[in-house]
Image (cartoon, rainbow, N blue to C red):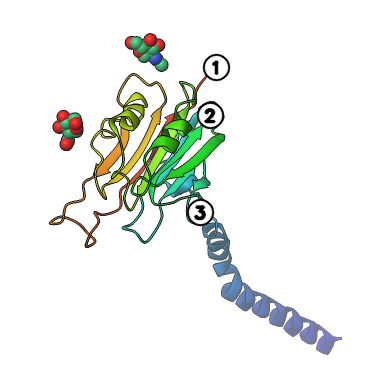
Amino acid sequence: MRTAGVIRFVLVLFTLVVTWLFSRTYLRDWPRSFRNLADLKPAKNKCGNIRSCAKHHFAFKIISGAANVIGPSMCLEDKMIMGNVQNNVGRGINIAFINGANSEVLKCGSFNLYAEDPTELIEFVKPVPAGTVVMIATYDEPASKLTDEARKYFTDMGSAFGKNISFRDNWVFLGVVGMNITSPYEKWIKNDAYANKYDGWPEVVEMEGCIPRKMK
Ligand SMILES: *[C@@H]1O[C@H](CO)[C@@H](O)[C@H](O)[C@H]1NC(C)=O
Ligand SMILES: *[C@@H]1O[C@H](CO)[C@@H](O)[C@H](O)[C@H]1NC(C)=O
């Protein structure tokens, strides 16, 4: 009886010590492991933007082409609407028209204004109704054959620099067709042999922000 009691005591003690060692080794790390799991999925803003957007706003990011090597990209509400992967960008001026009420893409087009006159570009832009959101990104060479008539459409969308875009400039823009005020969303960098990042081209221009949803 006495021996049995001692053995039971030793067994209980052994179990306690093993449990204690086990918890010391593993349990201590558990909260950290859970934290690591949470870190695998960090909260990310739409389009990878630095700032998140308020309710009833659409997040966007527009990046111009890089020299004549990497095509431009446009992201809206975390969706790439134009880019290399989408295979719908080209040298020249890339344009996407968007329904400002629901962020749906109405149409996208790419216009090579080094090789062709802007007839197609004008045909593309002309029928778009006032109030439509427009996103523009250039790639390589956007301006050789741009006419004043074509540039006037950019001005009507709220662009301040559409009339200035020249040979191999980089330009990104977001505006609204028929907007009577200058859009705050526009970046333009001139091709300047002395300041260029790449030999024959200026650096990439990138712009992100939030646009208010059009209310009916
Ligand atoms: C843009 O073009 C307009 C008209 O062609 C001109 O008056 C203006 O000075 C130009 N702006 C810049 C910054 O070059
Ligand atoms: C822009 O201005 C014109 C004339 O000033 C006006 O007729 C038109 O309705 C305006 N468009 C918008 C979208 O406010």
Q: Quadrant of the N terminus?
A: bottom right
- Front disc: 1 or 2: 2
Q: Residue at x 31, y 32 (%)?
A: 151
Q: CA distance from mark 3 to mark 2?
A: 30 Å
Task: From the top left corner, tell me how far across and down residue 69 is, in percent.
Answer: 36, 61
Task: From the top left corner, tell me how far across and down residue 125 is, in percent.
Answer: 45, 31
Q: Which one is in front, 99 or 49?
A: 99
Residue corresponding to mark 3: 42
Residue corresponding to mark 2: 99
Tag shown at residue 216: 1
Q: Residue at x 28, y 30 (%)?
A: 148
Which amino acid, by three-letter code, is at mark 3? Pro
Q: Earlier in the sequence, mark 3 or mark 1?
A: 3
Q: CA distance from mark 1 to mark 2?
A: 12 Å
- What element does badge 1 sit on? loop
Q: Is residue 119 above or below residue 12?
A: above
Q: Quadrant of the C terminus?
A: top right
Q: Residues within 10 Å of mark 1 (few under 14, many from 20)?
A: few
Q: Earlier in the sequence, mark 1 or mark 2?
A: 2
Which amino acid, by three-letter code, is at mark 2? Asn
Q: Is residue 58 visible?
A: yes
Find residue 110 and report its image quarter.
top left
* Cβ atoms at labels 3 and 2 below 8 Å apart: no
Q: Which one is in front, 150 or 101?
A: 150
* Cβ atoms at labels 1 and 2 below 8 Å apart: no
Q: Looking at this rendering, what residue extends furthest in the left direction?
A: 194
